[in-house]
Every structure is written in C-alpha cells, then in structure tokens.
Image (cartoon, grey):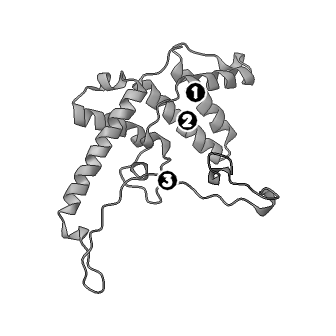
C-alpha cells in the first residue's frame, strides 16, 4: 500500500468528509460504509470486509489515514473553514475537492493526469500561492474603487481595506483566564527583576 498522490488523496478526503457527516448524524450504517469506502479506495485489491474483524478494519483505516496526512505547516491548511449558512445553487458534494484541480489547471495549464500525480503537499503549496495572488489582485482593484473610501457622518473619508481570509491574518495570542483556585498560593518572586548579582 503506497502513499496517495493528489488524485487519490482527494478521493480519500471525500470519504473522510462523508464519514464526518455520518458521525454528526449518528448514522452507524453510513459510518461503516464510509470507512469501508475509504479503505477500498486506498487499496488496489478488493477486500472482503466480512472476513476482517472490526478491530482489523479500524486499524487498517487509521494506518491509511496516518500515511496520508499532509504534514507540512501551511496557514491555509491549519485554519478550519466555517460552514456557510447560504449554499450556492451550483454547489455539489465534490466541489470543495475539485476546486484544487480547477485552480491548478487554470493557473498552470496542467492536464488532469499531471495534477493528480502531484504529491498533496506540493499541490497545497501551489494552491496557497494561487489564492494569495488572487487575494492581492482583488485588494489592488478594490483600493482603486470609491467603495474602499467610505465617508463617516462628518464627511471624513477613511480607507477601509478589503477583508482577508482568516488564514492570511496574523493570529493574536489568546488570553486565558486562570481560575482563582488554580493560581499559586504564597508570595511570587519575579526572578526577571533581579540583577546579575541576584539582589
């Protein structure tokens, strides 16, 4: 069993998406079906799941999942996209996965075979660069429009930048409130205020 290239990787991701939806709906039959389809897609040989124990099936599933996890540190992949409340009329279940192929074909002129032969990590880096370029172009075009310079109640004009996707924004450290009962008891000595002699 070999690690998946982009074509197979996207099929596996679709199976994982179906699995996640089945878990949300608490549909045990769909959960089992999604796991079987995931394993079957990743292996070239036909598998008789009736001869496998549930433990063997889950072990195989997690082994394949671990092997095909994208390991690079990309902002685009680290930020979870919130589900949209409004679904476009042209949306379909495979669209989030086909967008990758569309972007790569549109920007680089590669064939479907060439794109599906990429390693997922390489494809992800290419897609992120394409999305960054598209965003910067949109920001430039937006800055030339009067919409970017709204006037307040006093008539003062101020530039309002085009919002960026969350993965393009610098993350701020999140403040955490520590419960009072978990705070240390007694006198706290701040060693950073001491000089080199320890006084």
Dot 3: element: loop
Which residue lies at the image location 68% right of the left edge and 22% below the top edge?
Answer: 59
Residue position marked by numbered label 1 in the rendering: 65
Label 2: few (<14), some (14–19) or many (≥20) C-alpha neighbours in 10 Å: some
Residue found at x 42% / y 56%: 87
Image-quadrant location for residue 185:
bottom right
Labelled pair 2, 1 in contact (Cβ < 8 Å)? yes
Residue 105: image location, x then y, percent: 26, 33
Residue sitting at the far bottom: 154
* Mark closer to the observer (2, 1): 1
Question: Disc 2 to disc 3, how far (Cα)?
Answer: 17 Å
Query: Residue 90 at what x, y percent from top left?
Result: 35, 50
Of labels 3 and 1, earlier in sequence is: 1
Left or right, 156 with reference to 83: left
| Residue closer to the observer: 164 or 173 | 173
Residue 125 x, y percent position in the rendering: 36, 33
Observer-nearest of 148 and 170 = 170
- Rounded to the nearest angstrom, the CA distance separating label 3 from label 1 is 23 Å
Tag shown at residue 16:
2
Element marked by disc 2? helix
Instruction: State which tag comes first along the sequence, 2 or 1.
Output: 2
Whichever of callouts 2 and 3 sits on the residue coming sooner in the sequence is 2
Look at mark 3 in the image and give the residue it sits on.
Answer: 82
The image position of residue 99, as x and y in percent, is 35, 40
Helix, strand or loop under label 1: helix
Q: Residue at x 30, y 68 (%)?
A: 160
Q: Nearer the viewer, residue 63 or 27?
A: 63
Q: On screen, 23 above or below 120?
A: below
């Amino acid at each position: 069993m070999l690690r998946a290239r982009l074509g197979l990787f996207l099929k596996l991701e679709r199976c994982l998406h179906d699995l996640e939806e089945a878990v949300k709906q608490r549909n045990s039959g769909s959960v089992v079906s999604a796991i079987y389809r995931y394993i079957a897609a990743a292996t070239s040989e036909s598998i008789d799941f009736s001869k496998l124990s549930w433990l063997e099936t889950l072990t195989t599933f997690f082994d394949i999942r671990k092997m095909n996890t994208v390991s690079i540190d990309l902002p685009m992949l680290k930020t979870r996209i919130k589900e949209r409340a409004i679904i476009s009329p042209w949306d379909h279940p495979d669209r989030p996965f086909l967008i990758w192929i569309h972007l790569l074909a549109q920007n680089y002129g590669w064939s479907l075979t060439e794109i599906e032969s990429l390693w997922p990590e390489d494809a992800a880096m290419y897609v992120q660069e394409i999305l960054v370029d598209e965003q910067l172009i949109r920001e430039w075009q937006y800055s030339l429009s009067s919409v970017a310079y709204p006037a307040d109640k006093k008539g003062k004009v101020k530039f309002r930048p085009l919002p960026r996707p969350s993965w393009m924004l610098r993350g701020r450290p999140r403040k955490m409130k520590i419960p009072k009962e978990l705070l240390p008891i007694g006198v706290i000595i701040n060693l950073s205020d001491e000089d080199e002699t320890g006084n």
